[in-house]
Image (spheres, grey):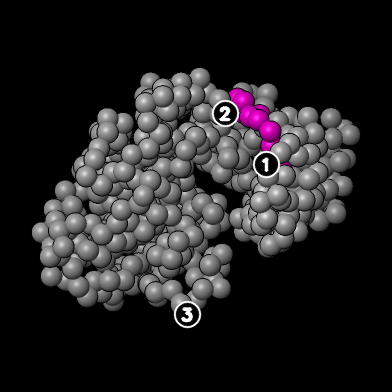
Amino acid sequence: MARGALAQSDGRQTWGELLAADRRHVWHPYAPMPSMTPPLPVVSARGVRLRLADGREVVDAMASWWCAIHGYRHPVLDAAVGDQLARMAHVMFGGLTHEGAVRLAERLVAMTPDGLEHVFFADSGSVSVEVALKMCLQFWQAIGRPGRRRFLTVRGGYHGDTFGAMAVCDPVNGMHRLFRGVLPEHVFAPRPPDGFARSLDQRWAAEVATLVEQHADELAAIVVEPVVQGAGGMRFHAPACVAWLRELCDRHDLLLVLDEIATGFGRTGALFACEHAAVAPDIICVGKALTGGYVTLAATICTPRVAEGIAAGPGRALMHGPTYMANPLACAAALASTGLLADGAWRADVARIERALSAGLAPARDLPGVVDARVLGGIGVVELADRVDVEAATGAALECGVWLRPFRELVYTMPPYVTDDEDLDRIARAVVAAAAAGGSDEAAQSVRRREVRT
């Protein structure tokens, strides 16, 4: 680009000009280049509302992809980041440390299940999964079992977009199926049967046990999202399934890796989803809500057995080190965000969200084309028989004053915990309207008739 053009681009531009530049240059997630539909320009956010460039304010029912659990411009988080910025924004973590990182590590050890003692900071959820996989591989190499280099997981899972993480996502129905044949091939068990409240399905348990027995000598770990499969389908399964995987790991001396990036910090009604199963993993991955949506940060936390095993190996060190590892601004935000959870008030908020969504999404079950409407903690999902018309569904939600981002066959919400009852009602109505508009014409007409009657 010429210098004159660069100078001109730094000047004040209209949103029409900015959106035109966005279309020319900006590649958005899970979208073609250029994008088929223009993104909505956001100029500010406060509480649970996003202010758009055209002056509209909409309730963010997505908590910015599930991380802004305290809403936007929270005074405690703002103050923490501002105070840290006045001291230092960043410092390398190789050979140096800082107070925020140490205090955050102590807090994460105190918050997570017993036995998890050692914290490796990463710069995103996907990277924390990469670190977990590398921990497992280095552990078995260090103790003389290099043949243990594959992972067992379940279909329907999603663990991120980086290379190792993609390999443990569903290779058939997941969003990374284009990379089959290039990614390492791991062992995939059937998806756990749906239903949070159900008991352990013995047929599923037997199938998984058989797979583990067949591959035990080559498996390094079992890797799963406990209780809730997130971007792979927003499905809920019984805690008993997680407990069974822990038992199989113990029986065959495998490591258990739990991906709590989406579920951690209260989203399912427990601080961590594995608590529903009374299970502690060997390695846990956390991210998203860790900083309350302020700055990207994640962590991979492991037991002393894993850390000491790696340290006893030839290289001694875990071979990973992100440039922005333990970024001080991110650690300050994370300390503030986790501090807001300390008094336990989030439990009442998540329970309140669960009640509101359970009642508010119930009418969706009567819509043609709707397969299921389900709620767990602060997660509400309406599943359609066919793929959602995202543009129509999003438009219907915006008419209700709500921002939603449907995908595949799903219209769902994960609102901030601070969302009040009036906005929860608005969100539920928006989800139902979006499911109707994004599905069949008959479904949309059904909702319009219901709105006229009420």
Relative placement, left or right, of 282 versus 358 is left
> Badge 3 is on which residue?
181
Q: Nearer the viewer, mark 1 or mark 3?
A: 1
Between 196 and 290, the residue placed more toward the observer is 290
Q: Secondary structure at mark 3?
A: loop
- Dot 2 crowding, Cα within 10 Å, few <14, some 14–19, many 20+: many
Asked whether 6 falls inside the magenta stretch, the response is: no
The x, y position of residue 199, in whole percent, is 41, 51
Relative placement, left or right, of 255 versus 152 is left
Q: Can see residue 49?
A: yes
Indicate which disc residue 259 carries: none
The x, y position of residue 340, in whole percent, is 42, 24
Up-down relation of residue 426 to residue 258 (above or below):
above
Residue at position x 20%, y 48% from top?
A: 303
Relative placement, left or right, of 314 versus 147 is left
Label 2 sits on what residue type? Answer: Tyr
Distance (Cα) linking label 2 and label 1:
27 Å
Label 3 sits on what residue type? Answer: Gly
Residue at position x 54%, y 54% from top?
A: 231
Quarter-of-image position of residue 98: top left
- Residue span colored magenta: 39-49
Up-down relation of residue 25 to residue 350 (above or below):
below
Distance (Cα) linking label 1 and label 3:
44 Å
- Dot 1 crowding, Cα within 10 Å, few <14, some 14–19, many 20+: few
Between 262 and 353, the residue placed more toward the observer is 262
Q: Can see residue 359?
A: no
Distance (Cα) linking label 3 and label 2:
42 Å
> Badge 1 is on which residue?
10
- Image quarter hosting the N terminus: bottom right
Q: Secondary structure at mark 2?
A: loop
> Badge 2 is on which residue?
72
Q: How many marks?
A: 3
